[in-house]
């Protein structure tokens, strides 16, 4: 049997690799040429691994165990997200297109003054689509997507973290164009006087900053080919105010991802309902959009999932004996019932804190 796919919470199935398939330039090919379709065989699985082994063996100065770990657990394949999957957030999408997607797809146009940024920060309340945006950027820019939660560097990978960070950046250069997505960046680049900061997390943070700077220098020197220009650190945080000042300045763009506004909630609710048999009229939908003011994208998803359970819930055990077409459609009342216990996860006070930080440090647009 093929080895079991290793996956992190954020990674999809590792062997089903449409992401790699979609990738264009040099290194993704290493992974892509053997990408398999639905029926995976031992042979094809092994040859992906062979190619990866060759890749690792060819990288001098990179710890092979860390490199393997990155290819297994941090490079994300599959589960592609496209712009259209994300409701609203047009300002963020446009900013990401200009900062990452266009420069990655047309490096010839983005040099000199148009040199692309090396770092972009997405900040805002939890559940507003930051991770989805990062994944869409990787898909749309046909990049290799490295996804790591910063807190895992200081917990799961602790002890290996410096080697891992070095290998991460080396592989990202090698497999460029690459997006290094770091979720919860605050836990890596939190301000130095954080009580929790101990010697080892300080070392990991320094290593990360050094590797990140090298990327900028190498790109400026153009000494290793243009693909070096196409490695970007894209980070997300729900706690932007805890990032220390020096680190903050390295994110040339800091994009606020706010709670969804009316039109965004509408688009998301419509999308969620489109997969469901329901009786909501336009007027009902309107009411629901009003009722979900101050809900995040993930709160809305949770609400819709809960409401969709309404028709099943009322059947109790009879559910087991009821045929699918006898189940009644979801109605507005199901949503209203669910609103009793699915509440917005961000408080007004919490929101104000984000808005103030956005005013002070966010990129406009
Ligand atoms: P964040 O990274 O900001 O915490 P995520 O991107 O992980 O949030 O979003 C969590 C979930 O919420 C998604 O999987 C999706 O179901 C839903 N969601 C959030 N924002 C949106 C959006 N703009 N459009 C569609 N779904 C969204």
Image (cartoon, grey):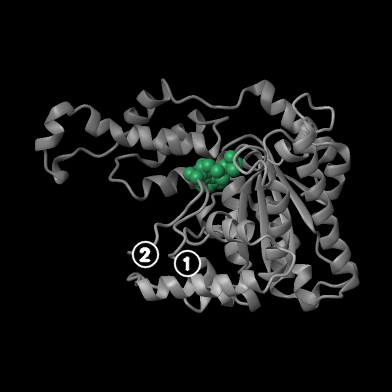
Task: Tell me which corner region of the image, top left, top right, bottom left or bottom right, holds residue 66.
Answer: bottom right
Return the x and y of residue 228 as percentages of the image width and height: 77, 70
Residue at disc 1, secondary structure: loop
Evaluate whether residue 11 shows in this view.
yes
Disc sitting over residue 2 in the figure: 2
- Residue beneath disc 1: 17
Residue 33: where, in percent of width, then height? 51, 79
User: How far across and how far down the image is residue 180, in percent?
Assistant: 68, 56
At x 15%, y 45%, the residue is 325
Q: What residue is at 34 percent from the left and 50 percent from the top?
A: 275
Query: Which quadrant would residue 237 be assigned to in this image?
Result: top right
* 107 is higher (above) or lower (below) than 19: below
Distance of label 1 from label 2 (alpha carbons) = 15 Å
Q: Which mark is residue 137?
A: none
Between 298 and 237, the residue placed more toward the observer is 237
The crowding category of the residue bearing disc 2, from other C-alpha atoms within 10 Å (few below 14, some 14 to 19, many at least 20), is few
| 153 sits to left or right of 32 | right
Q: Which mark sits nearer the N-terminus, 1 or 2? A: 2
Q: In this view, does 154 lie to the left or right of 109?
A: left
* Front one among 286 and 117: 117
């Amino acid at each position: 049997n093929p080895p079991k796919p290793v996956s992190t919470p954020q990674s999809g199935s590792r062997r089903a690799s449409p992401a790699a398939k979609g990738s264009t330039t040099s290194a993704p090919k290493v992974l892509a040429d053997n990408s398999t379709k639905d029926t995976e065989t031992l042979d094809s699985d092994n040859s992906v691994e062979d190619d990866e082994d060759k890749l690792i063996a060819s990288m001098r100065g990179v710890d092979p165990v860390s490199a393997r770990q990155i290819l297994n657990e941090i490079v994300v394949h599959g589960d592609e997200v496209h712009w259209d999957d994300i409701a609203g957030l047009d300002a963020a999408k446009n900013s990401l297109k200009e900062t990452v997607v266009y420069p990655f797809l047309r490096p010839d146009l983005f040099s000199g003054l148009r040199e692309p940024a090396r770092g972009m920060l997405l900040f805002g309340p939890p559940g507003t689509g930051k991770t989805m945006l990062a994944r869409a950027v990787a898909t749309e820019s046909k990049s290799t997507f490295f996804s790591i939660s910063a807190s895992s560097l200081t917990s799961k990978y602790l002890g290996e973290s410096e080697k891992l960070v070095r290998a991460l950046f080396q592989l990202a250069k090698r497999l460029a164009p690459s997006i290094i997505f770091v979720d919860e960046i605050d836990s890596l680049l939190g301000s130095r006087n954080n009580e929790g900061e101990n010697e080892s997390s300080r070392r990991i943070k320094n290593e990360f900053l050094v590797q990140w700077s090298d990327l900028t220098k190498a790109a400026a020197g153009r000494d290793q080919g243009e693909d070096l220009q196409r490695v970007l650190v894209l980070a997300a945080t729900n706690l932007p105010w805890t990032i220390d000042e020096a680190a903050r300045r390295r994110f040339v763009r800091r994009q606020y991802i706010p709670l969804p506004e009316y039109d965004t909630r509408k688009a998301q609710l419509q999308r969620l309902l489109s997969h469901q048999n329901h009786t909501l009229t336009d007027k009902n939908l309107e009411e629901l959009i009003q009722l979900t003011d101050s809900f995040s994208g993930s709160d809305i998803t949770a609400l819709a999932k809960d409401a969709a359970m309404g028709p099943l819930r009322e059947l109790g055990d009879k559910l087991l004996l009821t045929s699918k077409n006898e189940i009644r459609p979801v109605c507005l009342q199901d949503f209203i019932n669910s609103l009793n216990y699915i509440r917005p996860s961000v408080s007004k006070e919490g929101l104000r804190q984000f808005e103030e930080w956005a005013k002070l440090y966010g990129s406009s647009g």
